[in-house]
Image (cartoon, rainbow, N blue to C red):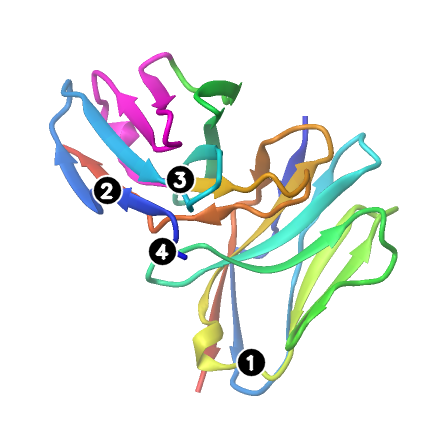
Amino acid sequence: KAGVTQTPRYLIKTRGQQVTLSCSPISGHRSVSWYQQTPGQGLQFLFEYFSETQRNKGNFPGRFSGRQFSNSRSEMNVSTLELGDSALYLCASRGDLGVGTEAFFGQGTRLTVV
Amino acid sequence: AQTVTQSQPEMSVQEAETVTLSCTYDTSESNYYLFWYKQPPSRQMILVIRQEAYKQQNATENRFSVNFQKAAKSFSLKISDSQLGDTAMYFCAFKSNTGNQFYFGTGTSLTVIP
């Protein structure tokens, strides 16, 4: 069974640009969450999608948005990039086996804003 | 709101020795799940162990075990017979029974010394 796939692995963007990151969950998983990981801050929750609907959202500005497609693939978009957006962005998928089901993570997209 | 605290930013251990990573959390909920994830240099977050709060028995997975103290809201990870491959960042995570979001600590960087 293929794991969670995130593309691209690395990205360098300029301040003010926008970026779109992609995540393909494990086959059969309908829940996809996004996290921002920075040194010292750990993982900060961005949002979660389930069956194309955003179920939960973290405390990030509106420049951060996402969506989920009918095949459960998800995209995350960041507009008007700032230097502080440089981070590792992790995507996680979960199955429907229960509330305690663990999250399976992708290898992340390393975004550098210059 | 839930918070997870890992007070040890860095730790080291000699190969074959035992090490304990600390984690405390704050929640007003009575039913929840706790996790330890490992993130090696490859960046892939891997589940190490999971504990259901309603279970008094501490979870064990091979060389990994936890000391779950619900009243103290403490969830430490013990790694026995440490191996070089255990070198990684370790994150403690909380998930409530009602929500879909994982709350992570800031991580502990563990180095196993040969």
Q: Residues within 10 Å of mark 1 (few under 14, many from 20)?
A: many
Q: Which mark is residue A36?
A: none
Which sits in the foreground, A64 or A4?
A4
Q: Chain of mark 2?
A: A
Residue stretch rendered in magenta on the structure: A62-90
Q: Chain of mark 3?
A: A
Residue B47 appears left or right of A78:
right
Q: Residue at x 80, y 30 (%)?
A: B28
Disc 3 with disc 2 on a shared chain: yes
Q: Chain of mark 4?
A: B
Residue position marked by numbered label 2 in the rendering: A7
> Is B3 placed above or below A81 here?
below
Q: Residue at x 36, y 21 (%)?
A: A67
- Amino acid type at mark 3: Cys
Residue position marked by numbered label 4 in the rendering: B43
Residue A55 falls in image quadrant: top right
Find the distance from the CA under tag 2 to the CA under tag 1: 33 Å
Q: Which mark is residue B82?
A: 1
Secondary structure under tag 4 reads loop
- Amino acid type at mark 4: Arg
Q: Residue at x 66, y 28 (%)?
A: B99
